[in-house]
Image (cartoon, grey):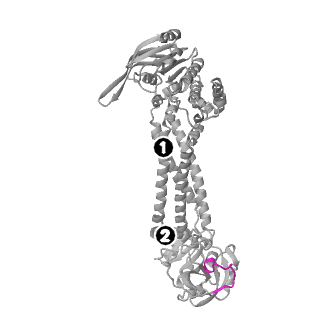
Amino acid sequence: MQPIVVCNNLCHEFQVAGGTIQVLKDISLEIYPGELTMLVGPSGCGKTTLISVIAGLLRHSAGDVFVLGKNIAKLSSMELLKLRREKIGFIFQQFNLLLGLSSNENAAVPLVANQQSWETAQAKSNALLTQLGMGNHLEKLPRQLSGGQQQRVAIARALVHDPKLLLCDEPTASLDSQSGQTVMKLLTELAVKPDRAAIVVTHDPRIYAFADRVVHMEDGRIDKVEQGKEAIRLQRH
Amino acid sequence: MMRVAFKMLMQDTAKYLGLILGIVFATVLIAQQAGMAWSVILMSVNATTSKTEVDIWVMKPNVEFVDTPESMAEVCLSRVLSVQGVQWAVPYYTGAGMLRSVDGLFKSVSINGVDDYTLTGAPSKDQMVMGNVQDLAQPDSVLVDYIGYRKLYPKAEPKLGGEFEIGQRRCTIVGIYKSKASFSGLPMIVTRRSVAVALARETLNSMTFILVKAKPGIDHRELADRISSETQLRALSRDNFVEMNINWMIKNSGIIENFGITVAMGLVVGIVIVGQTFYMFSVENRKQFAALKAIGVSNSVILQMLLAQAIFVAVIGYAIGIGICSALFYIMNLSPDSSLVGLFLPDTVALATAVIVIVMVILSSVVSAWKVLTVDPALVFRG
């Protein structure tokens, strides 16, 4: 099986006054389809930087990163945009929904950005939102929704164009415990498919049990990797 | 993505209305002041442009403005008539006098003397509200313009037969006509030239202009040049005469400077309000734009969205602003006694304001757009 993401000896550093800070150190990692991988670790360990690099939002300093077989260092800005638009779905900690758009319009945006008509896009987003239990909130604006409901709209937006890679940054951080569990349950049910991989950045140990693999990061390096839901669950308890 | 752009624009009603109000304010200020300036300038040539049957105006060589003419000798008319290509030429007199009404009050008036025999230069039939131009043939008869009549007799309904004195000579009103407002704002008296010079207490048979009609097929400018070279007088085609008067007004009246300051203020205030609101909009929405960029929307699409927003608010703001401005000019003209009668919103000013407003809004939007276009999409991963 071909991995969806491959990182080989990935390094990244930031220039700051008085020198450079190395935030990713020699990261080697493979993410396979059908797998939900969690990147965990303390703040500042490089989790968010790593998914920013994988998403092509940051250009890394050294090493290779392949996404869906493409070396992203060799892609132009336009090719990176196309890759993100067509093949990657995003879920953010702060939801980042467009405040003037209703739930179904928000969820339809990636399809419209991919040149689909509003009618087609909204039909797909309606169906997905209904699956996510948001059928009664299709016309509501983000400010009329709870945090959990907004994150469900964000999940619909991330999945509506059927991406091959799903990148989630702290998807439960802004939610209470119960909403967090519900969101993760929906995410694992809908997001993880045989041809799609999901990477979830989190420092919330309560959701580790949803992962197929947990990658522990520490000071820019991969510290250890835990395999299998059951193993992870047992280790937690 | 335009639908997204418009929904994002209208998500904050207060800011959206503030943006529209800023554009409305700038539009009203620019169009109203520029309209007033331009219509005041045009007033100076209303008397010229209304005489559509005249192709060429002849005057003394040192005349610079229609309201400051100099008298010419009677022989000048014969010299002009002798120039090849002239179909007809008639004398015309403009001057001023003091009118004494029946109640003993004195008022300044503008006196216009048309050719005694042909009445060329008198108002047309269509302009007459009451009476008949041909009645000028009666002794000491005059026509009065409608606005001027209302100024002379504010409380009376317009009627014929009224009398007043100018230059200690009694005159009778035989007609009232509609005319565009004059720059001086004085009531306009039209009479035969022989009567006009007497009213103005000028030398007998004085004339300030010679009105010329060119033969069919003759180029007006060429004929004007020929008249100038053969008579040593200044002859100008109607268009050139209008242009000369407008240039004189622009150069000597200070209108452009005075109104221009307010127009510039309107522009600056508009740029500040619109620019600031767009900037705040960009700053407050940068996370939303960053999210769009993260999911693969390109900067060129985002720029199109911002420009669509700018053009949308510019068109709405301009439409409301120009509507308010037109209403203001309409109200100004409601009372015939008002000194604002005759001011209007020229089409060219409305069009120029549209261009200025749209450019102003687009520029403000593009400057603010920089904040959005340079936003790092990785911002969405920072909590």
Residue at 53 percent across and 80 percent down: it is: B208
The residue under label 1 is B280
Magenta region, main secondary structure: loop
For residue B199, above or below residue A28 = below
Residue type highlighted by circle 1: Met
Task: Give residue B32's position: percent from left, percent from top.
Answer: 54, 61
Q: Describe residue B258's horizontal placement relative to residue A99 as left or right.
A: left
SS at circle 1: helix
Same chain assignment for discs 2 and 1: yes
Residue at 42 percent across and 24 percent down: it is: A49
Comes first in the chain, label 2 or label 1: 2
Q: Nearer the viewer, mark 2 or mark 1?
A: 1
For residue B81, above or below residue B298 = below
Q: Describe residue B292's horizontal placement relative to residue B145 as left or right.
A: left
Q: Describe residue A81's horizontal placement relative to residue A61 as left or right.
A: right
Which chain does tag 2 point to?
A: B
Numbered range of the magenta stretch: B150-163
Q: Is residue B162 magenta?
A: yes
Q: Residues within 10 Å of mark 1 (few under 14, many from 20)?
A: some
Q: Is residue A140 magenta?
A: no
Image quadrant where residue B143 sits: bottom right
Q: Residues within 10 Å of mark 2 (few under 14, many from 20)?
A: many
Q: Which residue ends up furthest to the bottom in the rendered image?
A: B168
The residue under label 2 is B249
Q: CA distance from mark 2 to mark 1?
A: 43 Å
Task: Give residue A181's position: percent from left, percent from top.
Answer: 56, 20
Task: Give residue B93's position: percent from left, percent from top.
Answer: 56, 81
Residue type highlighted by circle 2: Met
SS at circle 2: helix
Nearer to us in this view, B339 or B35: B339
